[in-house]
Image: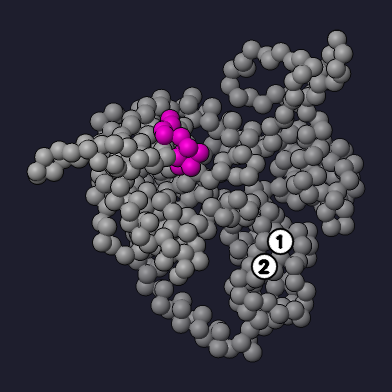
């Protein structure tokens, strides 16, 4: 038997450390590969950390509440020698591919660095707790953003293990401090919050409340979406071009393969991976859509990373990213789409799942909409809304003449940043996406 170190994993480019919230396994217990071993908190997300080996948890090196740097050992796992050998062989097989990819990434390192550099806005620092109580980085971040003093945080009764304050507890406190309307009789009074108003730009005309109204306070995600959407339209002049595409061949091909795909792989074959493939191919043809703006510089991105908007049960949207989408097959894209969508709805996405997008698609057709005018995900310069697929009577041109037939049609709505993308480029790009969909190879396998 051999011993291997389990280290604090990387959980996003900007995250250098994590706080151990709880161990899900005890010393002496068996662990399967990819089984969750502990729960870790960062300033962005709380997440479970899986084991990279199967074996027995022999020793825990970091206690609950400890802050551990990425890459530092946190546990010792006793594993079988054969598994060590198998891992070593797997590493050797991947080494050449990793070196080749590193060389490719090196050529775009300057661009990546420039594009990812953002101005850091200092956050107000909370005074230290006089009670010696432990708070996760996520709880502390929310407290700073919402202006909650340490004295009030110390007085909060936590529902977590040993009275620990959880994300749910701190958000409940935030909601309790928000403005409320009281009374149903004439002369309604309104409690005013001492917390500064969220700066969503110029404040609109104040709303008028009556006794029949309901006040719904934005949660943190909705506030973040509101800020980013307003910032996007204030940053970039949006223009939208529309194209209607004939998806009859795509629809027939999917109908032909979807049952076999479900039986073989245990997951659905949706239209989304087909759309992503067409977008990635069009970006290859028009790489100036795959850019970002940094002042008076245009950063041409080296990778094609497609974000896809996912609707959450709460009604909010989140945009996980499929990295290097142009290098994946339809089957690989389908796996990635289904995995990210499921983990998004289950609130199990990691910070790395949301980083580095270079272009985004939004399937408004899933809500029955025929088209839309989407807002850019900054600092990207393009986003494509995909409408619902509907049957239409269309003119079909043939060598023997034109005739009317029933076709499956869909509108593509391409919004783009008019600072760097002119109407010609924006229009040609969305037309090229439609061309790839209309010229879909119906003889291909999944």
Q: Main secondary structure of the magenta part?
A: loop
- Magenta-highlighted residues: 363-373
The picture places residue 234, in percent across and down from the top left corner, at 49, 24
Position above or below: 433 against 234: below
* Closer-to-camera residue (377/414): 414
* Closer-to-camera residue (411/148): 411
Does the rendering let one see residue 313? yes
* Closer-to-camera residue (161/101): 161
Q: Quick one: SS at disc 1?
A: strand
Residue with the mark numbered 2: 36
Mark identifier at residue 39? 1
The picture places residue 372, in percent across and down from the top left corner, at 43, 31
Does the rendering let one see residue 4? no
Point out the image quarter for the C terminus.
bottom left
- Does the segment drawn in magenta span residue 22? no
Q: Quick one: SS at disc 2?
A: strand
**In the figure, is residue 235 to the left or right of 138?**
left
Position above or below: 179 against 355: above
- The structure residue drawn at horizontal position 42% and vertical position 40%, both measured from the top left corner, is 388
- The structure residue drawn at horizontal position 72% and vertical position 30%, both measured from the top left corner, is 217
The picture places residue 177, in percent across and down from the top left corner, at 81, 30
Mark closer to the observer (1, 2): 2
Report which quarter residue 342 is drawn in.
Answer: bottom right
- The residue carrying pointer 2 sits among few (fewer than 14), some (14 to 19) or many (20 or more) residues within 10 Å by Cα, namely some
Report which quarter residue 244 is drawn in.
Answer: top left
**In the figure, is residue 144 to the left or right of 277?**
right
- The structure residue drawn at horizontal position 29% and vertical position 42%, both measured from the top left corner, is 407
- The residue carrying pointer 1 sits among few (fewer than 14), some (14 to 19) or many (20 or more) residues within 10 Å by Cα, namely some
Alpha carbon distance from label 1 to label 2: 8 Å
- The structure residue drawn at horizontal position 76% and vertical position 15%, both measured from the top left corner, is 210
**In the figure, is residue 209 to the left or right of 329?**
right
């Amino acid at each position: 038997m051999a011993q291997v170190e389990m280290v604090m994993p990387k959980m996003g480019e900007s995250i250098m450390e994590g706080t151990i919230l709880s161990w899900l396994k005890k010393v002496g217990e068996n662990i399967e590969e990819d089984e969750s071993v502990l729960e870790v908190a960062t300033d962005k997300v709380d997440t479970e950390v899986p084991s990279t080996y199967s074996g027995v948890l022999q020793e825990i090196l970091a206690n609950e509440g400890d802050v551990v740097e990425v890459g530092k050992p946190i546990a010792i796992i006793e594993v079988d020698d054969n598994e060590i050998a198998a891992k070593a062989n797997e590493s050797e097989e991947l080494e050449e591919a990793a070196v080749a990819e590193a060389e490719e990434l090196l050529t775009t390192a300057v661009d990546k660095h420039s594009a990812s550099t953002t101005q850091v806005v200092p956050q107000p620092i909370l005074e230290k707790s006089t009670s010696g109580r432990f708070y996760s980085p996520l709880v502390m971040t929310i407290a700073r953003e919402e202006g909650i003093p340490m004295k009030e945080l110390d007085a909060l009764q936590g529902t977590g293990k040993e009275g620990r304050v959880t994300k749910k507890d701190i958000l409940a406190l935030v909601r309790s401090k928000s403005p409320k309307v009281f009374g149903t009789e004439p002369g309604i009074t309104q409690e005013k919050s001492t917390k500064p108003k969220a700066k969503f730009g110029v404040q609109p005309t104040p709303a008028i409340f009556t006794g029949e109204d309901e006040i719904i306070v934005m949660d943190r995600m909705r506030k973040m979406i509101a800020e980013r959407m307003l910032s996007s339209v204030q940053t970039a002049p949006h223009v939208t071009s529309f194209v209607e595409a004939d998806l009859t061949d795509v629809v027939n091909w999917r109908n032909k393969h979807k049952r076999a795909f479900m039986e073989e792989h245990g997951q659905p074959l949706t239209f989304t991976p087909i759309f992503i493939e067409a977008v990635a191919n069009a970006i290859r043809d028009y790489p100036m859509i795959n850019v970002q703006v940094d002042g008076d510089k245009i950063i041409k991105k080296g990778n094609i990373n497609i974000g896809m908007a996912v609707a959450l049960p709460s009604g909010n949207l989140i945009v996980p990213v499929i990295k290097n989408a142009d290098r994946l097959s339809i089957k690989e894209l389908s796996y990635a789409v289904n995995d990210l969508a499921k983990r998004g709805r289950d609130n199990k996405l990691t910070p790395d799942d949301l980083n580095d997008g270079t272009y985004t698609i939004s399937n408004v057709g899933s809500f029955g909409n025929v088209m839309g005018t989407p807002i850019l995900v900054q600092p990207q310069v393009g986003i494509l809304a995909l409408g619902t697929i509907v049957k239409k009577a269309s003119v079909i041109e043939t060598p023997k003449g034109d005739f009317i037939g029933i076709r499956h049609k869909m509108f593509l709505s391409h919004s783009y940043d008019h600072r760097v993308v002119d109407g010609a480029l924006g229009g040609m790009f969305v037309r090229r996406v439609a061309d790839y969909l209309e010229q879909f190879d119906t003889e291909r396998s999944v």
